[in-house]
């Protein structure tokens, strides 16, 4: 929508509010004469003007600029359409906030990856794309294998908002990409290694530009997914990204003499399930078929006990089980507020608290009790 059409949208929300123009301006904390000039097209609405109008009207800034609600992608692989719609509602909330922030000047960093050469099998394409992604992570001074907080790493390195939410049964995750938004939403889970793999899987879809604008995934281990070329590539990307070949070859026992404790320690150190690690090592010819069958039956709790990481596993399960807003989105929303470009409402919405309570908390001065001699 052209910026010249914004006054028409503002007039519409004022009319629907039941307030007069003057009453609406007062409630929004806007100067009446400036509001009149903006509605007449003599003066443009500032970003803060639009944020305040949106708050009073109960809409988003993006709506005032022209709502770009996205439909469910035709390539969505979900057996239950209502589950897909419920997941999209969660995603749209974050996407609209990011669109508003982009308008206010807080856009995501552009993806710096170059697409690998096309060709080869889908597995080979996924592995090549993962090699480029791993290199990008290493250039930032870290390793994907060392990071339990994969969501934070993906946000920092690739400029993708990552959220976890209580999605309905039938949806494990989705990837959203358009001009203003790059977003991954994964389901909360009591199986944190699976949630972590899903984040990597959805990142693979984004980097490969699959199914723009929205790609919704249900069971990424299902037979249907395993037959789809884009899913084969995304799974190959996730395995190669989370478990880079060069890293595994450096840390495999030189003699190839694996035992269950050595294997369990490596699985815990790399924040993956024993099954995922067993298959990856086997596909790289680092363990035998018999070892694969033994190791892939090891449970996460058994691996953690053998590696002395029971506490770490419990904390990880707790973190994966809770909904979490994208941290980059939280930071940018608060920055927009402190920079005077937005109201406090979007930040309060992300935190799940009411605006008045949050404002009171931010304004409160904390005084420590003096120590008694």
Image (cartoon, rainbow, N blue to C red):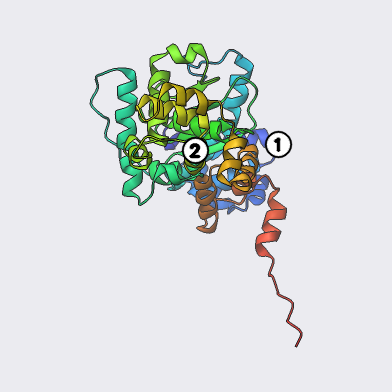
Residue under pointer 1: 18
Which residue is located at x 35 percent, y 28 percent?
Answer: 284
Residue under pointer 2: 267
> Is the C-beta separation of discs 2 and 1 under 8 Å?
no
Which residue is located at x 65 percent, y 37 percent?
Answer: 321
Q: Position of residue 115 (x, y in %)?
A: 27, 30
Q: Earlier in the sequence, mark 2 or mark 1?
A: 1
Looking at the image, which residue sits at the far bottom? 373
Identify which residue, 352 or 316, lies in the foreground. 316
Tell me: residue 112, above or below residue 274: below
Residue 260 visible in the snapshot = yes
Looking at the image, which residue sits at the far right? 372
Tell me: residue 84, above or below residue 39: above
Tell me: residue 229, above or below residue 173: above
Which residue is located at x 43 percent, y 11 percent?
Answer: 227
Residue 96 visible in the snapshot = no
Identify which residue, 326 or 123, lies in the foreground. 123
Q: Position of residue 59 (x, y in %)?
A: 60, 37
Q: Position of residue 289 (x, y in %)?
A: 42, 21
Mark 2–mark 1 Cα distance, whole angstroms, equals: 60 Å
Quarter of the picture containing the C terminus is: bottom right
């Amino acid at each position: 929508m052209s910026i010249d059409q914004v006054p028409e949208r503002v007039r519409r929300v004022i009319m629907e509010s039941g307030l007069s123009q003057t009453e609406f301006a007062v409630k929004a904390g806007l100067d009446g004469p400036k509001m009149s000039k903006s509605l007449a097209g003599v003066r443009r609405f500032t970003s803060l003007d639009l944020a305040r109008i949106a708050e009073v009207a109960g809409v988003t800034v993006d709506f005032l600029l022209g709502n770009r609600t996205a439909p469910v992608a035709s390539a969505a692989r979900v057996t239950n359409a209502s589950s897909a719609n419920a997941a999209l509602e969660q995603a749209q909330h974050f996407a609209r906030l990011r669109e508003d922030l982009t308008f206010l000047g807080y856009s995501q960093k552009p993806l710096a990856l170059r697409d690998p050469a096309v060709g080869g099998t889908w597995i080979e394409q996924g592995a090549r794309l993962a090699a480029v992604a791993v290199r990008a992570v290493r250039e930032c001074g870290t390793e994907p294998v060392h990071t339990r907080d994969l969501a934070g790493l993906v946000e920092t390195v690739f400029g993708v908002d990552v959220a976890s939410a209580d999605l309905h049964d039938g949806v494990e995750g989705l990837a959203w990409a358009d001009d203003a938004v790059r977003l991954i939403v994964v389901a909360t889970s009591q199986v944190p290694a699976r949630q972590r793999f899903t984040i990597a899987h959805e990142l693979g879809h984004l980097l490969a530009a699959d199914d723009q604008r929205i790609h919704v995934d249900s069971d990424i281990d299902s037979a249907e997914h395993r037959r789809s070329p884009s899913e084969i590539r995304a799974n190959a990307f996730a395995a190669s990204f989370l478990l880079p070949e060069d890293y595994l070859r450096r840390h495999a026992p030189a003699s190839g003499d694996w035992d269950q404790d050595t294997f369990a320690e490596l699985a815990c150190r790399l924040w993956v399930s024993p099954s995922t690690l067993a298959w990856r090592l086997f596909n790289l010819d680092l363990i035998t078929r018999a070892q694969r069958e033994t190791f892939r039956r090891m449970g996460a709790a058994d691996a953690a006990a053998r590696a002395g990481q029971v506490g770490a596993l419990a904390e990880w399960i707790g973190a994966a089980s809770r909904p979490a807003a994208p941290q980059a989105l939280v930071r940018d929303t608060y920055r927009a507020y402190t920079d005077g470009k937005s109201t406090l409402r979007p930040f309060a919405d992300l935190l799940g608290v009411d605006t008045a309570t949050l404002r009171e908390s931010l304004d409160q001065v904390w005084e420590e009790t003096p120590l008694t001699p």
